[in-house]
Amino acid sequence: MIISKITKVAIIVILGAGLLLSGCASQDTGRPRTLNQLVNDGDGPEWLVKGGKVFSGDKRAFYGVGSAGRVRNPSLMRKSAQAQARREIASQFKVYVAALNKQYMADITAGDGDAHSEEQAVTDTLKEVTDATLQGVTIEEYWEHPERNEAYALARLDLDSFLEKVRNYESGKAEYKELSEKVRKRVEQNSKKAFDELQGELDKQ
């Protein structure tokens, strides 16, 4: 009877240990958590799943989230994620500038001179200023997935830096001097409207 009780206890202990080990094994060999799960568990920043919406209280700025995976070289993976984040900002920002250009064109009337020439000049001006502005994109944060070979980067572009470059823009052509001043005024007047429209389109996606 005593042997029987000892045997039962031993079996229970062995079974309990087996279940414990089995649970650990399944936990270790389970699938990696998704980004949403990591964020919900507090193991990842919110911008991974919400992008720039996390910073809705911030002043006007563009945000881009880039990712890279399956890259053995850590330095290369970081650079790839950062480059992707910058590309995302560039795509958003060019849509914003296109909206500014459209609003400027809407202000041109038949009595303002050669509308076609002015349109081309404005387009060239905004392109030059855009190219200069995008060089100022900064990487705010970098994060690596703890359970798989993936990296994420958050890039930011301050809209005020763009407006500052517009204010300081000077065309090299004498006939565009007056135009440059008109561009500056129109861009500043329409910048908030264009930014809000872009944010509205992004929220729909």
Image (cartoon, rainbow, N blue to C red):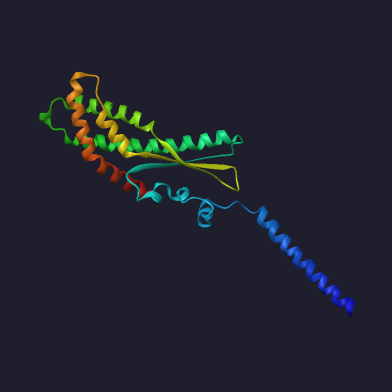
Relative to 14, say whether 175 is above or below: above
* Left or right: residue 86 compared with residue 10: left
Circle count? 0
Q: Is residue 115 above or below residue 161?
A: above
Task: Tell whether 43 sits left or right of 125.
Answer: right
> How far across and how far down the image is residue 78, in percent?
53, 37
- Which is nearer the eye, 80 or 202? 80
Q: Quadrant of the N terminus?
A: bottom right
Q: In screen coordinates, is 2 left or right of 196?
A: right
Snapshot quadrant of residue 99: top left
Residue 173: x, y in percent? 22, 19
What residue is shown at x 32% (from left), y 46% (from top)? 59
Q: Residue furthest left?
A: 111
Q: Is residue 67 left or right of residue 148?
A: left
**Residue 97's quadrant in the figure?**
top left
> At x 51% / y 34%, what residue is drawn?
79
User: Residue 52, image x and y in percent?
Assistant: 40, 47
Residue occupying image coordinates x 43% and y 50%? 50
| Observer-nearest of 127 and 189 | 189
Residue drawn at x 19%, y 36% is 106
Q: Position of residue 165 (x, y in %)?
A: 29, 31
